[in-house]
Structures are given as structure tokens and as C-alpha cells.
Image: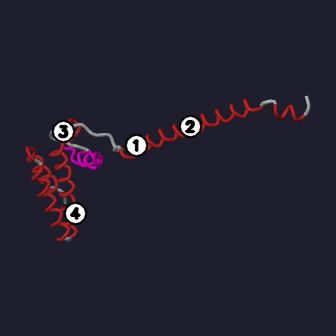
Amino acid sequence: MNKKEKQNRGGFLGKGLFRLLSIVLILFFLVTAGLGIGRIRERITEDRYSYYEEADYLRNLRNEKYQDLLDMTLDDSGAHRVYEGDIPQCRAIGMYYDAALLCHAYEKAGSAEKAAFQKKRMERFAAQAGDYQEYIEKIDALISSYE
């Protein structure tokens, strides 16, 4: 076999098979990349935090763990999150606790304007507490006991 025959041995069949495999591999890569991009978009748009259940909120409320309730409220926030049952009232109490702490701190520091702003927040969240007004009173008693 001479040199020229060796080069042409694969001929058209070899080149055609190479082209076919190249096209299949390119299509496979494009499909895989497209699916990967779709998964990444899903992950970006979905909420990053797991949701707490109503029982979690109520447990912290009944145990008077207001800081834990506030932490849950802040952690359990999502753009498309729908709060059902007693969760909105529990969240309002958590936010009331936050506003009450800040109000107390600003009053102690002599910042009347900032304390007044927190008082307005307290009033707004107290109105959202619904059937759990007793916890608003307990938070007020707790905060007033701080020196």
C-alpha cells in the first residue's frame, strides 16, 4: 500500500462518520447546556429558605421566645410566600417585639424622633396581632422591666 492509498483508506465513510459523531456530540452538548441553564434559573427564582410551619411559630409564641419568633419571621420571608392560618399574627408579634426593643433603646438613648417612629411600628404590628393581643401586653411588661 502506498502513501496515497493509506490517506484515502477511510475515504468518504470515515469522514461522514466523523461528521455524524461531531454533530451528535454538539447536539448533546447543547441540549445538556440548555437543561442546565433551565435548572439554574429555577434555583435562582425559587425561595432560598425553607418555610416554617404554623406549629413552629405558635410554639415559639406560646413559649414566649420572642427573639426566636422574630428570627423566624425574618428568615421566613420570600417574594412569593403566602402566609396562612395564624402565621401572619405570629409574624406581627415578632415584628412588634423588634419595634418595642428598638423603641426602648432609643428612649434610653434620648432619641425621641427614632423612638416615635418605632412607636408607630408597634401600633401597626399590634393591630395585626389579632387574637394574640395578650402577647403584646406580655412584651410590653417584659420590655418595661429592662433597665
Say which quarter of the image contains residue 18: top right
Give residue 135's position: percent from left, percent from top. Answer: 12, 47
**Structural distance between the alpha carbons of marks 4 and 1:** 40 Å
The residue carrying mark 1 is: 43
The image's mark for residue 58 is 3
Dot 4 or dot 2, earlier in sequence: 2
Helix, strand or loop status at disc 1: helix
Helix, strand or loop status at disc 3: helix
Along the horizontal axis of the image, is 34 left or right of 25?
left
Q: Is residue 68 magenta?
A: yes
Q: Residues within 10 Å of mark 2 (few under 14, many from 20)?
A: few
Instruction: Give, as a three-letter code, the residue at label 4.
Output: Ala
Tell me the mark number nearer the camera, choosing from 1 and 2.
Answer: 2
Tell me the mark number nearer the camera, choosing from 4 and 2.
Answer: 2
Along the horizontal axis of the image, is 36 left or right of 127?
right
The residue carrying mark 4 is: 105
